Amino acid sequence: MDRKQADRYPSDAVAVPDDRPERSGERALGDFAFTPAMARLALLAPAIAILVTVLALGLLELIGAITHLVYTGTLATSITTPDTSKLGAWSIFVPVVGGLIVGAMAKLGSERIRGHGIPEAMETILLRGSRMEPRLAVLKPLSSAVSIGMGGPFGAEGPIIVTGGAVGSIVGQLMHLTAAERRCLLVGGAAAGMTAVFGTPLASVLLAVELLLFEWRPRSIVPVALAACTAEVTREALVRAGLLHAAPLFPVTATAASGGMRVAAGAVVVGVAGGALAWAMTKCVYGAEDLFGRLPLHWAWWPAIGGLVVGVGGLLDPRVLGVGYETIGAELAGRLALGALVSLLLVKLVVWSVALGSNTSGGILAPLLMLGAALGAVLGAVLPGADTGTWALLGMAAAMAGVMRSPFTSIVFALELTHDVNALLPLTIVCTIAYLVSVATLKRSILTEKIARRGFHVSREYEVDPLHALLVRDVMSAVTAEYEPLRHEPVIAQAGETLRQAADRMLASGYSVLPVFENGDPPRLVGVVRQADLLKAHERVLVEERVRERPLRPARRLEPTPEAVP
């Protein structure tokens, strides 16, 4: 085990036996694997979701309480845009004080509370064996409540996702689960947190799939879906009990968008603009972070400096402060004039980029929704075929697809907000185009760029592993004299099992060559499979990716190599 592996799997980790059933041939192989552990995860996920939902809604209440207390001196917990009228010019220093508090919490408590949260969750999953420190479940929501409540131009979703993930990870550690099983509970907690905020369970599941799971298996999909559904049920129960306001986060009327040519053509324009906005937001954030990195100051002071810029921006346009849910609702309802939309777009982009670049604590989802809706509404002033609110909705979805590179999440998120199936076609167009522009113009998203700057690479492209598709008999070599002693080795491969199973057995046993047996009475030695043989599985992938053929010619077929036939 090398150093990176040792960092990922600490010395107190205990190997868990593989409880997958033995499979003797290709007919025993299934599309998906089921293990008893799946039932345990399916039972734990709803319990975690209930706790996360309560914590998430509690965080929103805390943000509202801080906002009212600091800006108006009143006691209330409703989420609102900070009112700077009472403080006047003194309101500039409110975000500065908030930045000082967050910087102190990060320095004295945990540096991992810095940033908007999702990159940290991805890093935990990929590099830390899905282990989150318990203190993150406390420090992250508290630091975010202070930052956002004192005017920070962020959403609460990123911190809530991290908090939910921390709860799931902690439960997984207490239950003595594997890293893969902890990941399922971590992501389930994150999906529950997003559902608790927006009331969009399906979009939350898709966000988990597109951003955090890094796999498509029943083992992970089932607990995540159960967690999101449980969070929505809990949320509705709290509404019925009078503990949560019944109104949606930002009310949206049906868009009445159709699939007409004018709307479709306009959707292409909005999609391109959404992709360009994603490029601008990413460049601005990390450009600001680079500037902060050149300051001769400890990073704990950066949030206070960023807070000063936020305070000035709040004097220019108070709507850029705080979570901005009211403003997003106004944009989607078409209640903002063109001048107000342009001001909001420019000022919000600047203050949000600088604040996030200072590595204070806060989420990116609400800001990108606000910016995208503003962009769509501005374009709606010249685009025909729909009202301003419809174009704001399309711009919001395009920005989400471009910035987070999660097109399916963005489409469903907008649909769950409006319940308007007529908007499906233009939403698909804008999200696909924005996703294309983002991928074409940026090597990494705003989420993965943070991880890349820490020296790691994240690939978000998914494809079928050829080791799962080919069987051992497809690549095995003939038995020669040098391999005859292997006949009596205790570790073997079956001719009808997948190469992935054989590769896992090689890794677990330390053998680089396994004898291959065919089922029978007695079993018959039919060949050997070497580590080098496993690379043959990638030959098909290389041919499909690199070989260009003229049309109407027979397709090249991969045949077993001569030595594979005993």
Image (cartoon, grey):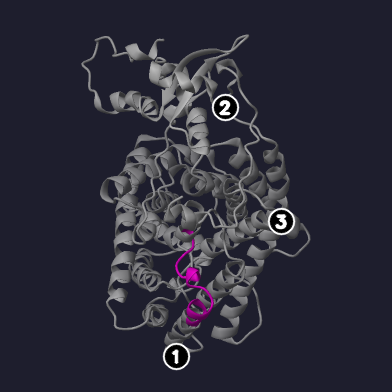
Q: Main secondary structure of the magenta part?
A: helix
Q: Nearer the viewer, residue 312 or 258?
A: 312
Residue 170 location (% of width, % of height): 64, 59
Quadrant assignment for the C terminus: top left
Mark toward the viewer: 1 or 3: 3
Q: Reply above or below: 455 against 401.
A: below
Q: Which quadrant would residue 355 be assigned to in this image?
A: bottom left
Q: Which quadrant would residue 482 be assigned to in this image?
A: top left
Q: Circle 3 — which element? A: helix
Give the mark nearer the N terminus: 1 vs 3: 3
Q: Which residue is mark 3?
A: 50
Mark toward the viewer: 1 or 2: 2
Label 2: how many Cα within 10 Å (few below 14, some 14–19, many 20+): few
Tell me the CA gap for discs 1 and 3.
Answer: 41 Å
Q: Nearer the viewer, residue 133 or 403?
A: 133
Label 1: how many Cα within 10 Å (few below 14, some 14–19, many 20+): few
Residue extending farthest to the left is 550
Question: Which amino acid type is shown beneath numbered disc 1?
Answer: Trp
Q: Reply above or below: 38 against 25.
A: below
Tell me the CA gap for discs 1 and 2.
Answer: 77 Å
Q: Circle 1 — which element? A: helix
Question: Which amino acid type is shown beneath numbered disc 2?
Answer: Pro
Residue 279 location (% of width, % of height): 30, 56
Q: Which quadrant would residue 385 be assigned to in this image?
A: top left
Give the mark nearer the N terminus: 2 vs 3: 3
**Residues under numbered marks 1 and 2 in contact, where contact means CB atoms less than 8 Å apart:** no
Q: Which residue is mark 2?
A: 490
Label 3: how many Cα within 10 Å (few below 14, some 14–19, many 20+): many
374 to the left or right of 222: left
> Which residue appears at 63% of the width and 56% of the height?
168
Q: Which mark is residue 90?
A: 1
